[in-house]
Structure formats: structure tokens, C-alpha cells
Amino acid sequence: MTDDFACPPWCQQSAGHLHVETDGPGDYHTAEIALIDLPEIPGLRGETAFAVRVEQYVTAGAVYQPVISLGLGGAGEPDDDAFTLDEADILASAISRAVTAVRNARTGRDQDDDAQG
Ligand SMILES: [Zn+2]
């Protein structure tokens, strides 16, 4: 083991957790930033959970950049989407703008639209 395999400060796993083989697959540093329970939206989505994680893939020959993964469902689901830090920044800004756009459009209108039914 070298310092190449030392955990970054954000990693939530125990020190020395990486199992990287010289000619084998790599391993991941991971941190679960948030796991948000989401109720059902009828006709659109069942009850689920939304996870925000940081992952960094490490092999014997390379340490890849950390990425932010967003996923519906449990840990390790293969449909996770991963974004670089810059991409995640852009995504977060875009989501904020979308929320603001819709909320601003409602200003002065019937607020009953917000009621949960
Ligand atoms: Zn780690």
C-alpha cells in the first residue's frame, strides 16, 4: 500500500478499505451525502429514495476524479448517474432555476396549487 490509496478526507469508509489488485478491477472511495425519502407522486413515481453520493474510482494504475452520483433506489443500483464536480454545479444551478421559475410563475395566482392532496 502506498499513499496513493489513502482515503480522501470526504471518504466515509474505514481507513485501508480499498481492495485494488495490480491486474484486477479497482475499488471506490465513497461517501453518502444525502438519502432523501420521496413519497409517491401518483401517475409519475412510486415511493422511493433519492441518494446523493460522492464516488472515486481507484485502480492500481490510476486515481480517477471524484464524481457526484445521483440515484433513485438503493446503493449500488446500476442506473446511477454520475457527474463531475463542475457538471454537478451546473446541474444544481439548473435545478434551482427550474424551481424558482415555477414558484415565481405561481406568485399572485391561486396558491391552492401548492396544496398536497
Ligand atoms: Zn476511502
Image (cartoon, helix red, strand yellow):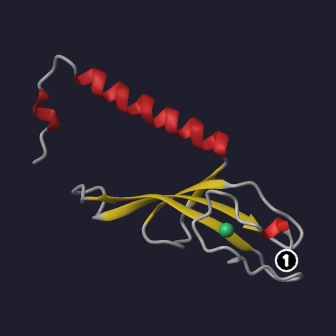
Q: At 84% across and 66% down in the image, what residue appears?
A: 4
Place of residue 105 in the rendered image (x, y in percent of width and height, measured from the top left): 28, 22
Q: Which residue is mark 1?
A: 1
Q: At 86% across and 71% down in the image, what residue appears?
A: 2
**Would you identify the image quadrant in which residue 36 lies?**
bottom left
Is ligand 1 within 8 Å of the beta carbon of the residue shown at mark 1? no
**Image height of 3 relative to 108, above or below:** below
Asked if residue 103 lies left or right of residue 85, the reply is: left
Q: Locate the N terminus by quadrant.
A: bottom right
Q: Judging from the image, what secondary structure is the residue with disc 1 in?
A: loop
Q: How dense is the environment of label 1, judged by Cα within 10 Å: few (below 14), some, or many (20 and up)? A: few
Place of residue 57 in the rendered image (x, y in percent of width and height, measured from the top left): 73, 65
Asked if residue 17 lies left or right of residue 113, the reply is: right
What residue type is disc 1 on? Met
**Would you identify the image quadrant in which residue 67 lies?**
bottom right
**Front-most of 27 and 99?**
27
Place of residue 13 in the rendered image (x, y in percent of width and height, measured from the top left): 60, 71
Q: How many marks?
A: 1
Q: Quadrant of ligand 1?
A: bottom right
Asked if residue 13 lies left or right of residue 111, the reply is: right
Place of residue 28 in the rendered image (x, y in percent of width and height, measured from the top left): 68, 70
Q: At 58% across and 38% down in the image, what residue appears?
A: 89
Q: At 36% across and 63% down in the image, what residue appears?
A: 49
